[in-house]
Each structure stands twice: as structure tokens, then as C-alpha cells.
Image (spheres, grey):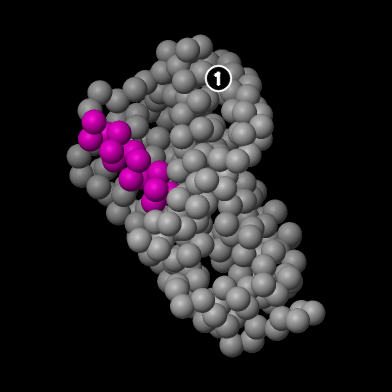
Amino acid sequence: MLYVAVALSSFRRYSTYTAATLAGIFTNSVFGVIISFSYIAVWKENPHAGGYDVTDALTYCWLAQAMIMTIAIWNGGTTDDVAERIRTGDVAIDLYRPVSFLGWFLAGDLGRAAYHLLTRGVAPTIVGALLFHLHFPTSPLTYLAFLVSVALGVVVSFSIRMLVASSSFWLLDQTGLLTLSSVFAMFFSGLVVPLVLFPEPFRSVVLALPWSAFVQVPIDIWLGQRHGAAVLGGLAFQAGWGAVLLLGCSGVLRLADRRVVVQGG
């Protein structure tokens, strides 16, 4: 129940930024329109590029816009709080709490993701559906699998962002790694273009990287590109990367805990 309370508290925290949310919805919608016309031009030349038709491509475009803040592809969320608390020394209080450090901030990030999914995820998708013909699943199980996939994508994203934030224990400033992480996430998640458009063998490589859990896997489930066992395979892929990366975070935090230096305190 503690972690549920932390998630709800984080949800309420982000819901206070109403103006920023509305501005974000407008921005995502504008970029969705711009990218949609780019996709229409591409699919007009190649109607079955990547195994998608133009409706699938447009749906991909708008769902990708919905993922930006939900998954925190460009960083942000509770891991930015971690990096700042390391810099100020407040992390010493977090490390002495009688609860899991990772569990506390993961619960907070899931609460943040839930708020962004319901606002900056749903609203731009509705705008896209009003302006273009999009693909919507007919089976409730597909929606359920999609939501599970999004949640697992948040866990994978959180783990990578936590690894970057943990570097502040040694570097004190995570800006360089944060920028590098953003570039990797933007290109290897499928946010810029669907990963299925890349030629082989590069396509197989990028689909095996953890960033494909951010955008490509959830959207393929929504589009029906994955059927039956392939859906379970996609979820298992995300869960596997999430488990490996969380174990990595746990190991890094144990190392950091041995040499915490509280500056100014």
C-alpha cells in the first residue's frame, strides 16, 4: 500500500501543472499533424513499407506522440529528482528510509506515467483520430496487452534513466550522459521512424535493444502486428530487459551506498 500511496502522490503532483499539460497536448498535436503528412508522403511511394499500410503508419505516428511523456523518452520524471537530490546531498535521507530506494522512485515514476498517459497520451490520440483515419483494436484483450506493454516500457525507461541518474554519485553532473541517453532513446525507440523500416541486419539489432520496448513493441501490439504468442513474446522481451536493468540499478546503488559523500552537510 505504501508504494500505491507514493504513486498516487506523484500522480497528484504532476496534475497540478495544468498549463504545462495543455501546452504539451497542443505541441504533441501539432507535431503529430506535421509527421502525419510526412508519413503519408512516404507511404504513397511505398504503400507497404515495414509491413504497415498508411493507416498503420498514421496510427504509429500518433501513438508515438502519446508515448513521449508517458515513457519519458527524453528523460525527466522521478530520476531527475534523484540526480538533483544526489547533487544537494538530500539523497542521504532517501538511503536511510526503511523502504526500497528503487521501489520508492519507481512507484513515483509509474504515478507520473499514469498521469501523462491519461492526458498527453489520450488527448493527442483523440486529436489524431479526428483528423486522420487511425487503426483501433477491436478486442479488449489487445487494449489490456497494450496497457501492460506501456507499463513495462515505463519500467525499462525508468531503469535506464536511473542508471544515468546514479552516475551523479561519481560525476556529480549527469548532463553529458543525460544528453547521450536522450539521443539513443530517440533513435532506437522508434520515435523518429518505426524500427521496422531499417534494413537488415541493423533492423534485428535495434529491435533487440532495450529502447525498442519504449515505442515499437507497444505500438506493434496495438496495430495487431503481433498475434497470440508473439504478444506474449513482446511482453516477455520487455519484462526481461526490465528485470536485467533493475538488477543493474540495484548493483550500482549498492556500490554508491558505500561511498556517499554529502556535500555541504
Residue sitting nearer the eye, 255 or 47? 255
Q: Quadrant of the C terminus?
A: bottom right
Residue at the (71%, 81%) spot, across then down: 262
Residue 145 percent across, percent down from the top left: 29, 40
Look at the magenta stretch and give its main secondary structure. helix
Q: Say few, some or many: other residues with alpha carbon within 10 Å of mark 1 (under 14 / 14 to 19 / 20 or more).
A: many
Q: Quadrant of the N terminus?
A: bottom left
SS label for mark 1:
helix
Examine the structure image and report whether residue 245 is included in the region drawn in magenta.
no
Residue at the (41%, 66%) spot, across then down: 244
Q: Is residue 17 visible in the rendered structure shown here? A: yes
Which residue was labeled with disc 1? Answer: 36
Residue sitting nearer the eye, 29 or 212? 29
Amino acid type, mark 1? Ser
Residue 82 percent across, percent down from the top left: 62, 64
Where 232 sits versus 193, above or below?
below
- The residue sitting at the right extreme is 264
Residue at the (56%, 63%) spot, across then down: 162
Residue at the (55%, 77%) spot, across then down: 95
Residue sitting nearer the eye, 158 or 9? 9
- Name the side, left or right, on which 139 lies relative to 210: left
Where 102 sits versus 35, above or below?
below
Residue sitting nearer the eye, 130 or 217? 130
Q: Which residues are magenta?
A: 140-153
- Name the side, left or right, on which 251 lies relative to 222: right
